[in-house]
Image (spheres, rainbow, N blue to C red):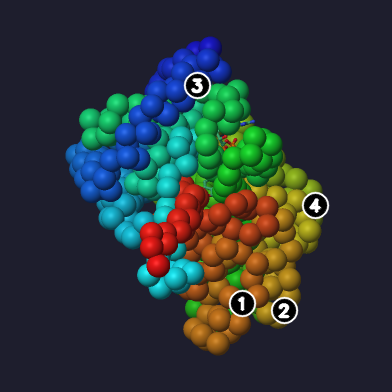
Amino acid sequence: MALESRSPQRPDELVAEFEEAGAEAVAAAAGRARAAAGPWAAGSALERSAALERAADALAGAAPELTGLMVREVGKPVTEAGAELSRGVGILRYYAQQALDPDGETYPGPSPAGLLLARRRPRGVAGLITPWNFPVAIPLWKAAPALAFGNAVLLKPSPDATGLALRLAELLAPALPDDLLQVVPGGAGTGKALLEEVDCLSFTGSVAVGRQVAVAATGRGIPSQAEMGGLNASIVLPDADPERAATVIAGAAMGYAGQKCTATSRAIVVGDPGPFTEALVAAVQGLAVGDPAEEATVVGPVITEQARRRVVEAAEEAASAGGRLLTGGKAGDGPGWFVAPTLVDNLDPGARLAQEEVFGPIAVVLAVPDTDQAVAVANGVGYGLVSSVFTGDLDRALGLAARLDTGMIRVNAPTSGVDYLAPFGGEKGSSFGPREQGKAARDFYTSTRTITILPAEG
Ligand code: NAD
């Protein structure tokens, strides 16, 4: 079946057309990947490191081209798209170095003259299923460690970002042995076929799909990890500067039209919400909305017409549930899937908009009387990816950090933003399986082999 991706800002513009890989094509790709994985794992870590460095150079050389493609295919504002390319290069270089780290540990054995070793070994063929919103960084933060530790990779990108995935693989190909990194284009059917062929599966996307993927992987007895949605809260304490907090939260909620798993969807204000709410509305209204190719643009379109409808309907439903529309709530004029950045307050924390991810430029302001209530509201959702706290009081910040049920907690910082050097992942519905990124990635892409060696005599 032929699939296509279109530019969200100019839906008439076809960006990529591709054939969906069926079960047979996926099995054939897996066979080639398995053949490539053997010599790659048997080769030296120095060779793998050098190959990843060459891949980083290739990506750096093509950064302007891929940035432009990212702007066109997924509507990411050009400044953010450029930063994502730089991050992709950084990720490849970081795992090129990690390939050279010690590959195991020694333990006290049964005899001082003997050795008890636990050495890392690759799993074989790593399957990656990725979303469209970080079309370079997410495939790379999975593929780079998988390759560094000796695996082959089969990537099934989102159909909405397949042009980028195919070009990325083409650019990296000369740096790597044949068939070591392959793209299998397609939708859900291709993802399911991939699950049947690989030795481990790393997924990023929605909660509904992530859970299905984890169940299917477990049914086959292969390890899986799933990074899924978020409903991230920023807590603003009474001592915080409302204007500064509002500026940071506006960017985290609405940048890239709120289409980040780490976007802020809930601002929880302790005490009088007035000054902060006023500052937030002003900050959101001041964000540049428009063509993502313009350097000043912060908020571009959402990915599809359906995504735009979801935002408008969520605003309407919140208003009918008693919420006050502070700004936005309307689809933009003209072509492209634009929707005005939207803020709602006066909602009950149990309202749908305060409980479910919309994945667009929409956020709620929730007022609470004290810190205990702030923690209860922040934790009172099914997600647990990231939260942030705004305060100058380190004791209170640390106290809150210990009580917030999210995988990442950021103080005086936006919920959005990922440090690839550190473990990344959430709690509750946001994540399943071991963490990604940083040194944590090795645990997923390798297994251990425990070896006992005793002296032959004595
Ligand atoms: P999605 O779940 O619709 O799709 C993700 C991937 O899964 C795509 O490649 C899709 O083709 C594939 N897929 C769909 N159905 C499948 C099935 N039954 N079996 C196997 N594969 C299947 O998500 P999306 O719309 O592409 O991305 C948006 C979502 O991703 C949001 O919920 C967002 O929060 C989440 N996200 C999470 C993180 C994170 O690190 N936690 C990062 C980015 C995005």
Q: What is the three-letter code of the residue carrying label 4?
A: Ala
In the picture, measured across the screen, residue 294 lies left or right of residue 274, that is: left
Specify the farthest residue to the front: 458
Indicate whether 416 appears above or below 191: below
Residue at image position (44%, 71%) is 111
Disc marking residue 321: 4
10 Å crowding of disc 3: few (<14), some (14-19), many (20+)? many
Name the secondary structure under disc 3.
Answer: helix
Q: Give the residue at mark 3.
A: 26
Which of disc 1 and disc 2 is earlier in sequence?
Answer: 2
Sequence order check: which comes first, mark 3 or mark 2? 3
Please report contact status of discs 3 and 4: CB closer than 8 Å, yes or no.
Answer: no
Q: Under tag 2, what secondary structure?
A: helix
Percent x, y of residue 17? 43, 17
- Residue shown at the point (38%, 34%) measured from the top left: 37
Disc number lying in front (2 or 1): 1
Which label belongs to residue 372? Answer: 2
Question: What label does residue 402 carry, if any?
Answer: 1
- Looking at the rendered structure, the secondary structure element under dot 1 is helix
Proximity of marks 2 and 1: CB atoms separated by less than 8 Å: no
> What amino acid does circle 3 point to?
Val
Question: Which circle's residue, 1 or 4, is located before the other in the chain?
Answer: 4
* Residue at 69% across, 36% down: 219
User: Residue 241's x, y, as percent?
Assistant: 50, 78
**Viewer-proximal residue, 216 or 285?**
216
Q: Amino acid at mark 1?
A: Ala
Instruction: Determine whether the beta carbon of the residue marked 4 sits less than 8 angstroms from the nearest atom of ligand 1.
Output: no
